[in-house]
Structures are given as structure tokens and as C-alpha cells.
Amino acid sequence: MEWTCLRRFGCKKIFLLSLAFLLLFCPATGSAGQLRQIRTNDLAVLFDIPVMKKAASEVAKIYPAVRAELSAAIGWEPGFYPTVYLVGSAETFQRMAGTHLITAFAIPKKNLIVIDHTRMNLHPITLSVTLKHELCHLLLHHHINTVRLPRWLDEGVAQWVSDGFSELTLPKKKQFLQAAVLSDDTIRLSRLSVRFPDSRDGLLLAYEESRSVVDYIVMTFGRDGLLQTLNLMRQGYETDEAIREALSVSLTDLERQWHLHLRKTGTWLLYIAVHIYEILFFMAALLTVYGFFRLTLKKQRYQDDDDDEDENDDLSQEEILPAEESR
């Protein structure tokens, strides 16, 4: 998530990040309340709790590999000196971000990445993929700086290079995109150009759509098609012009073809897969009801058979007794 996306939360408090950034140039004395830092030839890492020095060192250690992977995927070198701020308090991070729904965000104009370290679980893989995702935002805005980079393309590419990772802390179990396709309630890309929705469900749908449309571009036109689009935008082409030149299709037609693809490629199967537990529970409930009625009918049948046997026994006695009396 990058700076333009955070505006949808009305987060004026993010101005505090600029002040935090300025502290980078102040000597780190280690006094209470002051940011500490680790500087290398590649980046600066800020942290606000002494015990996070190990995590900050880990960021500095993995950054060269993350940068190399990102450059190989996009074909661009960063060409800037980023700062990564590891926030050691979830409450502090939420005040900065203005929301509890994300774990990290980037401010391209400051080449700044802010990460809620409390939700990284000290796991190098999580930290690495988060760093790659946010660094991708910085990279895209660094090179595409003369035209507007659509929010959906920015986020979609960042998820593409980080294997589907996003900063959201929302549960991934429910697939909002498939449900939206089934109900014909997807969000048009034009509405995702500048900002994402404010609502929780709308936000997750916007993230899923962003990833899906970029995946569709790569699947249909190849990785080169996506990279050519980005390179044209880097040269100053507007989004629609770049897509038309690189993919030989207008943005409107691309969106229409993408929607058609979503409807044709097993949407119902995907929907079933997503709701498999609810479906299994419903089927189990039906089987329980069916079993109950079947057992009830079986008991009723046994009772009817017993009544028939009693009647037969009475008839047999009536038939036998007269015969015995005649003897």
C-alpha cells in the first residue's frame, strides 16, 4: 500500500512520518523516544525499540537479495536510497496509517517504507515478501513519474511480483471477487484509478481485482506485455495509450475481456471451492434430516408389521380353538 492509497482513510496523522523521516539525519543516541538506525550502502533502517536491532539487521541483510529479485522481475533498477521504518508498536503504526487493516505502506515521495513489525512474527519470509511488495511501489513511482500510475495497476503489479502478497490483514478465506462476479457487482477499474473504497469488503475486493487483472494481462499477453506497458508509461504514455500500444487493445476492451474470462473460467467451481465448508455443513444437515425421516419411517414400518403379526396371531387362535373343541 502506498501513500495515495492511504488518503482514502483521511489520515492526516501520516504527516508524523515526515517528522520520523527527518530523524534519520539526526544522530542516534539511543535515548528514550528517539529512533535508532542502521545505515548501509543500500538503505537505512529505522527502529524505535532497542530489542528490534536484530530485526533491523535482518532487513539490511535481506535487502540486496530482495532488490535483485524485484529488478529481475520488472527489469528496472531502484536508483534511489530507501528508508525502512520498523514500528515496534501496533498502536503507533495504526495511528500513522490511520487504519488497522494493513501491515505496511510506502510513501514514494520520501522513498520510505513503514512496516508494523509486531505483525511480522519475526519470520524472515514474511518480512522479505513485505519488503519486496512495498519496494515495488517505490520502484514503480520512481520510474513512472510523468503520468499518473493507476492505483489498480500499482497494487496489481506489487502483488504479482510478491506472489500474491498484499499488506491487508483481512482474512483471505472469503473470495470477494468470485462473489462479485457472480452477482455482477465488480468495481470498474476507472473507480480504482486514484483510490480504493473505504469499506472493509470494498477494500478487499479492490485488492483482489487489482491482482486478478494483472494476472490476466500476464496470462493473455505474457510477461513481456505487462512490462512493455510499464515501460511505455515510464516514457510518458498515459495508461490507455500504453495498453493500446503494448497489448493492441483498449483499456475498456481489456476490462471487458477480463470480466468475460472471469465468468467463463469456472467461476461456479471457484465459488464452490471457496464456500466448501458451508456447503459441506449444509449437505451434512440435509443428510441428518434425511436420516431422521428415514429412521422415523422405518420405526413406523416396524410398528405396522408388529400390529399385523398381532392380528395374525389372534386369527390363528380363533381358527385353531374351534377345531380343538370339535375333537
Image (tube, rainbow, N blue to C red):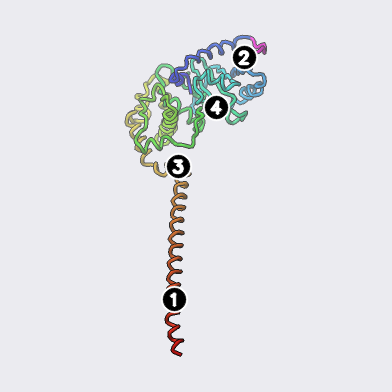
Boundaries of the magenta span: 27-33
Which element type, helix, strand or loop, lies under badge 2?
loop
* For marks 4 and 2 on the same chain, the one whose residue lies earlier in the sequence: 2
215 magenta-colored: no
Q: Is residue 86 visible?
A: no
Relative side of 25 to 185, left or right: right
> How far separated are the C-alphas under marks 1 and 3?
59 Å
Counting residues from the start of the chain, the first of labels 3 and 4 encountered is: 4
Q: Nearer the viewer, mark 1 or mark 3?
A: 1
Residue topped by disc 1: 314
What amino acid is labelled 1 in the image? Asp
Instruction: Give the residue pinned by disc 2.
Output: 35
Q: Secondary structure at mark 3?
A: loop
Specify which label sits upstream in the sequence, 1 or 3: 3
Q: Earlier in the sequence, mark 2 or mark 1?
A: 2
The residue pinned by badge 4 equals 130
Nearest to the observer: residue 218 or residue 101: 101
Q: Find the distance from the CA under tag 4 to the CA under tag 2.
A: 21 Å
Please, what secondary structure does the residue beneath circle 4 have?
A: helix
Name the amino acid type tagged 2: Leu
Query: How far separated are the C-alphas under marks 2 and 1?
Result: 99 Å
- Compare residues 201 and 145 and report the one nearer the observer: 201
Say what amino acid the circle numbered 3 marks: His
Residue at image mark 3: 275
Labelled pair 2, 1 in contact (Cβ < 8 Å): no
Q: Nearer the viewer, mark 3 or mark 4?
A: 3
For the residue pair 206 and 283, the one nearer the viewer reads as 283
Question: Marks 2 and 3, Cα distance to the nearest angstrom?
Answer: 46 Å
Marks 2 & 3, CB-CB < 8 Å contact? no
